[in-house]
Image: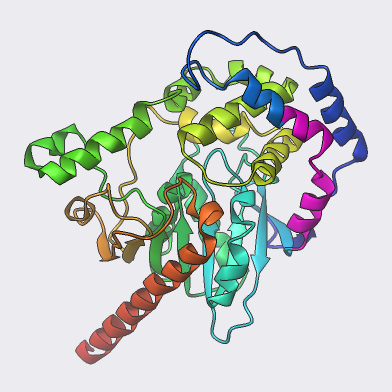
Amino acid sequence: MSDEILPFRIDIPQAELDDLRDRLARARWPRQLPGEGWSRGVPVAHLRELADHWATDYDWRAWEARLNAFPQFTTEIDGLDIHFLHVRSPVPDALPLILTHGWPNSVVEFLDFVEPLTAQGFHVVAPSVPGFGFSAPPSTTGWSVARVARIWAELMRRLGYRRYGTHGGDLGAYIAPEVAVADPEHVVGVYIDGGLGFPTEADVPEMTPDELAGYELMKTWSTGGVDHHALLRAAPQTFCYGWDDSPIGQLAWLAEKFHQFNVQTSRDVFLTNATVYWLTGTSGTSSWPMYETTGFGWPGGQKAVPSGVYAGPPGIRRLAERTNHVIHWPDSNPGQGHFPAMEVPEALAADTRSFFDKALAYAAEHEQSRAAAR
């Protein structure tokens, strides 16, 4: 294994874009089933409008150029070529921060988030999770979020960062805490969009009325719409044939999930994420976090370093503190969508700074205490 880090640039052959438009133009559309709105899944009229825009007005080359405005690289770790953005801040003594995107997202999640973060004093490292976008997919079974976290720790070592923070949402909320477990000597804090302290049925007897109301809301997230965890545990290969052969099939799948997750973003950003999935053929390979599990569970976190969240409720802080050292738990940050980096990037960046200021102060205080004890 080499530690070599190579420059990377997205450069999709025109023939692949022509093939995408041709497939969209030849789509065989189903009839609309009876039912109101999204009750039967993605409405035909909604998807036809999206597909028409994708085929005729959407400009991949403009978005490709926007992605290429970020310095990008690849390096081989654990047998896989890992793609990542690496954007340094002009702020003196900026803190390195490794971002982990969610599912079914990609580094497109951070298009509007990188600049506010660098302005807030962070050197940004944003890898594509293995099997997503431009990172190679796992070729064996046995992958886990802990294994990805060890890759992230090695990546930060190769970049020369000896002190850094870790941040994530959705899938990233599982990976980010594991980075601290893998590299506690160098991680100063774990910040996630949300997900700590989510209760289970076992916690119901001790919950207050307000907590119970939040729990009922939370259950709709995991039970409403298509249960992608169960589907992708059962037969991911079966669905790959539709996703990888039909851009309409893939588009419907992503539209279903973004609607269920209440993702607030523009049509073109959504289509840029969809185009990355289509061009890299990663709708199936990105499902390994589900097919490598036996059941669904909320992020547990860790106690190696301090933790903070962008949005606490409907998580319950006292439950989160069973498995995390929580020092940042706001109740009313703006943004109601599943991916706040896409919806409220400025607010998320400012709150990220607020948490890591606390985490750095905590680290300095405890270092002084250890020095005094010596």
Placement of the C terminus among the 4 image quadrants: bottom left
The verdict on residue 197 being magenta is no
Near-viewer residue (125 or 30) = 30
Residue that lies at the very extreme toward the bottom in this rendered image: 372
Q: Main secondary structure of the magenta part?
A: helix
User: Residue at image x 73%, y 59%?
Assistant: 73
Residues in magenta, as a range: 51-69
Q: Is residue 196 above or below residue 132?
A: below
Which picture quadrant has residue 57?
top right
Near-viewer residue (150 or 52) = 52
Placement of the N terminus among the 4 image quadrants: bottom right
Q: On the picture, is 367 further left or further right than 110?
A: left
User: Residue at image x 73%, y 38%?
Assistant: 275
User: Residue at image x 13%, y 36%?
Assistant: 204
Which picture quadrant has residue 332?
bottom left
Q: x%, y% of residue 114? A: 61, 64
Near-viewer residue (265 or 83) = 265
Q: x%, y% of residue 24? A: 79, 24
Asked if residue 133 shows in the view, the reply is no
Q: On the picture, is 75 further left or further right than 296?
A: right
Q: Is residue 142 above or below residue 159?
A: above
